[in-house]
Amino acid sequence: MADVMTVRGPVPPSELGRVMPHEHLLSLTPGPWLTTGTRDDRIDLAVGALAGLEARGFGTVVDLSPYGVVGRDPDGAEIAMLAEISERSGLHIVSGTALYLEAYAPAWAREATLDELTARFVADAVDGIGGSGIRAGIFGEQATSLGEITPFEDRVLRAVARAHRETGLAIMTHTTHGTMAHEQVDLLASEGVDLDRVVIGHLDTQLSVDLARSILDRGALIAVDTIGKEVWDFFLEPAAERPDGEFPKRSFARSDRGRVEFVAELVADGYADRIVLAQDLTGAEVWMNPGTHGQLGYAHLADRFLPALAAHGVPEDAIERMTARTPARLLEVGA
Ligand SMILES: [Zn+2]
Protein backbone atom coordinates (compact mmCIF):
# COMPACT_ATOMS: atom_id res chain seq x y z
CA MET A 1 0.00 0.00 0.00
CA ALA A 2 1.62 3.24 -1.16
CA ASP A 3 1.19 6.03 1.34
CA VAL A 4 2.83 9.23 2.46
CA MET A 5 4.15 9.16 6.04
CA THR A 6 3.01 12.34 7.78
CA VAL A 7 3.70 13.28 11.40
CA ARG A 8 0.20 12.05 12.23
CA GLY A 9 0.47 8.79 10.32
CA PRO A 10 0.06 7.51 6.78
CA VAL A 11 -2.02 9.48 4.27
CA PRO A 12 -2.90 8.56 0.67
CA PRO A 13 -0.95 10.75 -1.81
CA SER A 14 -4.22 11.87 -3.41
CA GLU A 15 -5.07 13.79 -0.22
CA LEU A 16 -2.00 16.01 -0.09
CA GLY A 17 -3.14 18.90 -2.27
CA ARG A 18 -0.36 21.22 -3.30
CA VAL A 19 2.84 20.71 -1.32
CA MET A 20 5.55 23.02 0.00
CA PRO A 21 8.42 20.51 0.10
CA HIS A 22 11.15 22.44 1.94
CA GLU A 23 10.19 24.52 5.00
CA HIS A 24 11.23 24.90 8.66
CA LEU A 25 8.10 25.34 10.77
CA LEU A 26 9.79 25.73 14.15
CA SER A 27 12.22 28.44 13.08
CA LEU A 28 9.91 31.34 12.38
CA THR A 29 11.22 33.75 15.00
CA PRO A 30 14.00 36.10 13.89
CA GLY A 31 17.37 34.38 13.82
CA PRO A 32 18.18 31.58 11.41
CA TRP A 33 19.14 29.01 13.99
CA LEU A 34 16.92 30.02 16.87
CA THR A 35 15.70 27.11 18.94
CA THR A 36 14.70 29.04 22.05
CA GLY A 37 11.35 30.60 22.88
CA THR A 38 8.59 28.75 24.62
CA ARG A 39 7.05 25.70 23.09
CA ASP A 40 3.66 27.34 22.73
CA ASP A 41 5.10 30.46 21.05
CA ARG A 42 6.69 28.42 18.35
CA ILE A 43 3.59 26.34 17.73
CA ASP A 44 1.36 29.43 17.65
CA LEU A 45 3.70 31.17 15.21
CA ALA A 46 3.64 28.22 12.83
CA VAL A 47 -0.11 27.73 13.02
CA GLY A 48 -0.63 31.44 12.33
CA ALA A 49 1.85 31.45 9.46
CA LEU A 50 0.19 28.45 7.81
CA ALA A 51 -3.36 29.78 8.14
CA GLY A 52 -3.80 30.98 4.55
CA LEU A 53 -2.34 27.99 2.75
CA GLU A 54 -5.35 25.73 2.54
CA ALA A 55 -7.46 28.38 0.79
CA ARG A 56 -4.68 28.57 -1.80
CA GLY A 57 -4.82 24.86 -2.56
CA PHE A 58 -1.87 23.82 -0.42
CA GLY A 59 -2.60 20.91 1.88
CA THR A 60 0.88 19.74 2.87
CA VAL A 61 4.13 21.21 4.19
CA VAL A 62 7.38 19.29 4.52
CA ASP A 63 9.56 20.29 7.48
CA LEU A 64 13.04 19.54 6.21
CA SER A 65 14.93 20.62 9.35
CA PRO A 66 18.14 18.72 10.17
CA TYR A 67 19.06 17.77 13.73
CA GLY A 68 20.20 20.77 15.76
CA VAL A 69 19.34 23.60 13.34
CA VAL A 70 16.42 25.68 12.03
CA GLY A 71 14.13 24.73 14.90
CA ARG A 72 14.95 21.01 15.18
CA ASP A 73 16.48 20.14 18.54
CA PRO A 74 19.71 18.11 18.52
CA ASP A 75 18.00 14.81 19.42
CA GLY A 76 14.62 15.25 17.76
CA ALA A 77 12.93 15.14 21.18
CA GLU A 78 10.57 18.00 20.29
CA ILE A 79 9.23 16.46 17.12
CA ALA A 80 5.73 16.11 18.61
CA MET A 81 5.39 19.87 18.12
CA LEU A 82 4.99 19.21 14.40
CA ALA A 83 2.07 16.88 15.08
CA GLU A 84 0.44 19.59 17.16
CA ILE A 85 0.95 22.15 14.38
CA SER A 86 -0.58 19.71 11.91
CA GLU A 87 -3.58 19.10 14.12
CA ARG A 88 -4.22 22.78 14.79
CA SER A 89 -3.59 24.02 11.24
CA GLY A 90 -5.44 21.18 9.53
CA LEU A 91 -2.50 20.73 7.15
CA HIS A 92 -0.59 17.55 6.54
CA ILE A 93 3.00 17.85 7.72
CA VAL A 94 5.77 15.51 6.68
CA SER A 95 9.00 15.54 8.67
CA GLY A 96 12.41 15.05 7.16
CA THR A 97 15.44 13.80 9.04
CA ALA A 98 19.00 14.78 8.21
CA LEU A 99 22.19 16.44 9.40
CA TYR A 100 23.29 19.86 8.28
CA LEU A 101 26.80 21.19 7.58
CA GLU A 102 29.58 19.71 9.69
CA ALA A 103 30.06 22.93 11.71
CA TYR A 104 26.46 22.74 12.96
CA ALA A 105 26.20 19.02 13.67
CA PRO A 106 25.37 17.77 17.18
CA ALA A 107 28.15 15.96 19.03
CA TRP A 108 26.42 12.57 18.75
CA ALA A 109 26.49 12.85 14.99
CA ARG A 110 30.12 13.89 14.72
CA GLU A 111 31.12 10.90 16.81
CA ALA A 112 28.92 8.38 14.97
CA THR A 113 30.24 5.86 12.47
CA LEU A 114 28.70 5.37 9.04
CA ASP A 115 26.85 2.28 10.27
CA GLU A 116 25.54 4.10 13.35
CA LEU A 117 24.32 7.02 11.25
CA THR A 118 22.62 4.66 8.81
CA ALA A 119 20.91 2.85 11.67
CA ARG A 120 19.74 6.15 13.14
CA PHE A 121 18.18 7.31 9.86
CA VAL A 122 16.53 3.94 9.30
CA ALA A 123 15.11 4.09 12.83
CA ASP A 124 13.83 7.64 12.18
CA ALA A 125 11.90 6.30 9.19
CA VAL A 126 10.74 3.02 10.69
CA ASP A 127 10.30 3.59 14.45
CA GLY A 128 10.14 7.38 14.80
CA ILE A 129 12.38 10.39 15.42
CA GLY A 130 13.82 10.86 18.91
CA GLY A 131 11.87 7.95 20.33
CA SER A 132 8.57 9.80 19.67
CA GLY A 133 6.98 7.28 17.35
CA ILE A 134 6.63 10.10 14.79
CA ARG A 135 8.21 8.78 11.64
CA ALA A 136 10.24 10.66 9.04
CA GLY A 137 8.62 10.73 5.59
CA ILE A 138 11.68 11.85 3.65
CA PHE A 139 15.44 12.27 4.13
CA GLY A 140 16.63 15.89 4.07
CA GLU A 141 17.80 18.49 3.87
CA GLN A 142 21.09 16.61 3.75
CA ALA A 143 23.82 19.18 3.37
CA THR A 144 27.21 19.75 1.83
CA SER A 145 29.46 22.80 2.28
CA LEU A 146 30.43 25.60 -0.02
CA GLY A 147 32.72 24.14 -2.66
CA GLU A 148 33.55 20.98 -0.69
CA ILE A 149 32.11 17.86 0.87
CA THR A 150 33.87 17.41 4.21
CA PRO A 151 34.61 13.83 5.39
CA PHE A 152 31.74 14.18 7.90
CA GLU A 153 29.33 15.34 5.19
CA ASP A 154 30.45 12.49 2.94
CA ARG A 155 29.75 10.00 5.72
CA VAL A 156 26.29 11.38 6.49
CA LEU A 157 25.21 11.62 2.84
CA ARG A 158 26.33 8.01 2.41
CA ALA A 159 24.32 7.03 5.51
CA VAL A 160 21.24 8.73 4.06
CA ALA A 161 21.82 6.87 0.79
CA ARG A 162 21.96 3.53 2.62
CA ALA A 163 18.92 4.35 4.73
CA HIS A 164 17.08 5.27 1.51
CA ARG A 165 17.93 1.88 0.03
CA GLU A 166 16.53 0.19 3.10
CA THR A 167 13.38 2.28 3.51
CA GLY A 168 12.57 3.70 0.06
CA LEU A 169 12.23 7.25 1.38
CA ALA A 170 13.21 9.97 -1.10
CA ILE A 171 16.22 12.25 -0.50
CA MET A 172 16.32 16.04 -0.68
CA THR A 173 19.69 17.76 -0.40
CA HIS A 174 21.04 21.15 0.56
CA THR A 175 23.74 22.47 -1.71
CA THR A 176 25.49 25.58 -0.46
CA HIS A 177 25.06 28.14 -3.25
CA GLY A 178 24.42 25.32 -5.68
CA THR A 179 27.99 24.03 -5.30
CA MET A 180 28.84 20.30 -5.17
CA ALA A 181 25.59 19.37 -6.92
CA HIS A 182 27.26 16.90 -9.29
CA GLU A 183 29.41 15.55 -6.47
CA GLN A 184 26.24 14.83 -4.47
CA VAL A 185 24.80 12.93 -7.44
CA ASP A 186 28.11 11.06 -7.87
CA LEU A 187 28.13 9.96 -4.24
CA LEU A 188 24.46 8.93 -4.20
CA ALA A 189 24.81 7.05 -7.49
CA SER A 190 27.89 5.24 -6.17
CA GLU A 191 25.75 4.02 -3.26
CA GLY A 192 23.16 2.61 -5.66
CA VAL A 193 20.49 5.23 -4.96
CA ASP A 194 17.61 5.49 -7.42
CA LEU A 195 18.21 9.03 -8.75
CA ASP A 196 14.51 9.34 -9.58
CA ARG A 197 14.07 9.55 -5.76
CA VAL A 198 16.65 12.34 -5.33
CA VAL A 199 16.07 16.10 -5.34
CA ILE A 200 19.17 18.30 -5.50
CA GLY A 201 18.30 21.36 -3.44
CA HIS A 202 18.79 25.10 -3.69
CA LEU A 203 19.65 25.13 -7.39
CA ASP A 204 17.91 28.49 -7.60
CA THR A 205 20.74 29.97 -5.55
CA GLN A 206 22.82 29.56 -8.69
CA LEU A 207 20.23 30.22 -11.48
CA SER A 208 22.38 28.46 -14.05
CA VAL A 209 20.11 26.70 -16.54
CA ASP A 210 23.13 24.76 -17.80
CA LEU A 211 23.91 23.42 -14.32
CA ALA A 212 20.25 22.53 -13.73
CA ARG A 213 19.97 20.73 -17.06
CA SER A 214 23.15 18.78 -16.44
CA ILE A 215 21.78 17.53 -13.10
CA LEU A 216 18.34 16.76 -14.55
CA ASP A 217 19.88 14.85 -17.45
CA ARG A 218 21.59 12.52 -14.97
CA GLY A 219 18.16 11.50 -13.69
CA ALA A 220 17.86 13.48 -10.45
CA LEU A 221 15.25 16.14 -9.78
CA ILE A 222 15.98 19.72 -8.73
CA ALA A 223 14.43 22.09 -6.22
CA VAL A 224 13.75 25.75 -6.80
CA ASP A 225 13.29 26.12 -3.10
CA THR A 226 14.47 29.54 -1.99
CA ILE A 227 11.66 31.45 -3.67
CA GLY A 228 11.29 34.89 -2.09
CA LYS A 229 14.84 34.94 -0.72
CA GLU A 230 16.10 37.80 -2.81
CA VAL A 231 18.79 38.88 -0.34
CA TRP A 232 20.59 36.45 1.89
CA ASP A 233 23.59 36.71 4.18
CA PHE A 234 25.18 33.78 5.82
CA PHE A 235 28.10 33.20 8.07
CA LEU A 236 30.69 30.64 7.18
CA GLU A 237 31.22 29.64 10.80
CA PRO A 238 28.76 29.08 13.69
CA ALA A 239 28.03 32.06 15.89
CA ALA A 240 29.58 30.47 18.99
CA GLU A 241 33.01 30.46 17.39
CA ARG A 242 32.75 33.95 15.91
CA PRO A 243 34.89 36.59 17.66
CA ASP A 244 33.98 40.25 17.91
CA GLY A 245 35.30 42.20 14.99
CA GLU A 246 35.74 40.91 11.47
CA PHE A 247 34.47 37.51 10.43
CA PRO A 248 33.85 35.64 7.20
CA LYS A 249 30.39 36.20 5.76
CA ARG A 250 28.85 35.83 2.32
CA SER A 251 25.91 37.64 0.84
CA PHE A 252 23.97 37.03 -2.30
CA ALA A 253 21.11 38.53 -4.24
CA ARG A 254 18.85 36.42 -6.45
CA SER A 255 15.67 37.96 -7.80
CA ASP A 256 12.42 36.07 -8.10
CA ARG A 257 12.24 37.46 -11.64
CA GLY A 258 15.41 35.48 -12.33
CA ARG A 259 13.82 32.40 -10.75
CA VAL A 260 10.72 32.80 -12.95
CA GLU A 261 12.86 32.92 -16.09
CA PHE A 262 14.91 29.94 -14.87
CA VAL A 263 11.83 27.77 -14.20
CA ALA A 264 10.08 28.90 -17.41
CA GLU A 265 13.08 27.92 -19.50
CA LEU A 266 13.36 24.49 -17.88
CA VAL A 267 9.61 23.86 -18.23
CA ALA A 268 9.79 24.85 -21.91
CA ASP A 269 12.59 22.26 -22.25
CA GLY A 270 10.24 19.56 -20.92
CA TYR A 271 11.38 19.29 -17.30
CA ALA A 272 8.05 20.16 -15.59
CA ASP A 273 7.95 16.74 -13.94
CA ARG A 274 11.46 17.11 -12.48
CA ILE A 275 11.18 20.37 -10.51
CA VAL A 276 9.70 21.18 -7.09
CA LEU A 277 9.05 24.64 -5.64
CA ALA A 278 9.41 25.94 -2.05
CA GLN A 279 10.31 29.02 -0.02
CA ASP A 280 12.65 27.65 2.69
CA LEU A 281 11.25 30.41 4.89
CA THR A 282 12.71 31.10 8.33
CA GLY A 283 12.31 34.06 10.65
CA ALA A 284 15.65 35.50 9.58
CA GLU A 285 14.66 35.67 5.93
CA VAL A 286 11.40 37.33 6.83
CA TRP A 287 13.46 40.21 8.14
CA MET A 288 15.93 40.21 5.29
CA ASN A 289 13.24 40.04 2.61
CA PRO A 290 10.46 42.39 3.67
CA GLY A 291 9.01 42.63 0.17
CA THR A 292 8.49 38.88 -0.24
CA HIS A 293 8.55 36.63 2.85
CA GLY A 294 8.05 39.64 5.12
CA GLN A 295 4.85 40.75 3.41
CA LEU A 296 3.30 37.49 2.38
CA GLY A 297 4.94 34.73 4.42
CA TYR A 298 4.05 31.31 3.07
CA ALA A 299 1.52 32.86 0.67
CA HIS A 300 4.31 34.37 -1.43
CA LEU A 301 4.62 31.25 -3.59
CA ALA A 302 0.90 31.04 -4.34
CA ASP A 303 0.11 34.74 -4.54
CA ARG A 304 3.13 36.14 -6.35
CA PHE A 305 5.41 33.45 -7.75
CA LEU A 306 2.92 31.09 -9.39
CA PRO A 307 1.02 33.97 -11.09
CA ALA A 308 4.39 35.31 -12.29
CA LEU A 309 5.19 31.90 -13.79
CA ALA A 310 1.80 31.85 -15.53
CA ALA A 311 2.34 35.38 -16.85
CA HIS A 312 5.70 34.18 -18.19
CA GLY A 313 3.99 31.46 -20.23
CA VAL A 314 4.28 28.48 -17.87
CA PRO A 315 1.11 26.41 -18.43
CA GLU A 316 -1.22 25.68 -15.52
CA ASP A 317 -0.63 21.96 -16.03
CA ALA A 318 3.12 22.43 -15.45
CA ILE A 319 2.41 24.43 -12.30
CA GLU A 320 0.18 21.61 -11.06
CA ARG A 321 2.95 19.09 -11.74
CA MET A 322 5.58 21.09 -9.88
CA THR A 323 3.40 21.93 -6.87
CA ALA A 324 1.32 18.77 -6.49
CA ARG A 325 2.01 15.71 -8.60
CA THR A 326 5.80 15.59 -8.39
CA PRO A 327 6.06 16.19 -4.63
CA ALA A 328 3.31 13.64 -4.02
CA ARG A 329 5.18 11.08 -6.10
CA LEU A 330 8.38 11.77 -4.17
CA LEU A 331 6.70 11.47 -0.78
CA GLU A 332 4.85 8.27 -1.70
CA VAL A 333 6.67 5.28 -0.28
CA GLY A 334 6.16 1.70 -1.27
CA ALA A 335 4.59 2.40 -4.68
ZN1 LIG B 1 16.17 24.65 4.26
Image: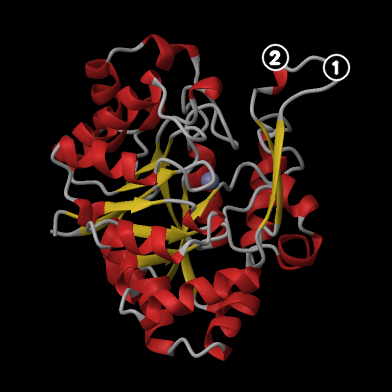
Q: Which quadrant is home to the C terminus?
A: bottom left
Secondary structure found at label 1 = loop
| Residue visible at 34% across and 70% down in the picture | 15
Q: Position of residue 145 (x, y in %)?
A: 49, 32
What residue is shown at x 66% (from left), y 33% (from top)? 33
* Residue 48, image quadrant: bottom right
Q: Quadrant of the N terminus?
A: bottom left
Residue at 39% in and 78% down: 267
Left or right of 55, for residue 253: right
Q: CA distance from mark 2 to mark 1?
A: 10 Å
Query: Residue 236 placed where, x, y %?
Result: 64, 28
265, above or below 281, in the image:
below
Which mark is on residue 244?
1
Labels 2 and 1 touching (C-beta < 8 A)? no
Q: Is residue 146 left or right of residue 10?
A: right
**x and y, in percent, of residue 27 in the image:** 64, 42
- Amino acid identity at mark 1: Asp
- Identify the residue shown where x is 76% and y is 23%: 247
Q: Is residue 265 visible?
A: yes
Q: Is 128 on the left-hand or right-hand side of 299?
A: left
Nearest to the observer: residue 129 or residue 299 = 299
Q: Is mark 1 within 8 Å of ligand 1?
A: no
Q: Is residue 67 above or below residue 53?
A: above
Q: Is residue 11 visible?
A: no
* Label 2 sits on residue: 241
Q: Amino acid at mark 2?
A: Glu
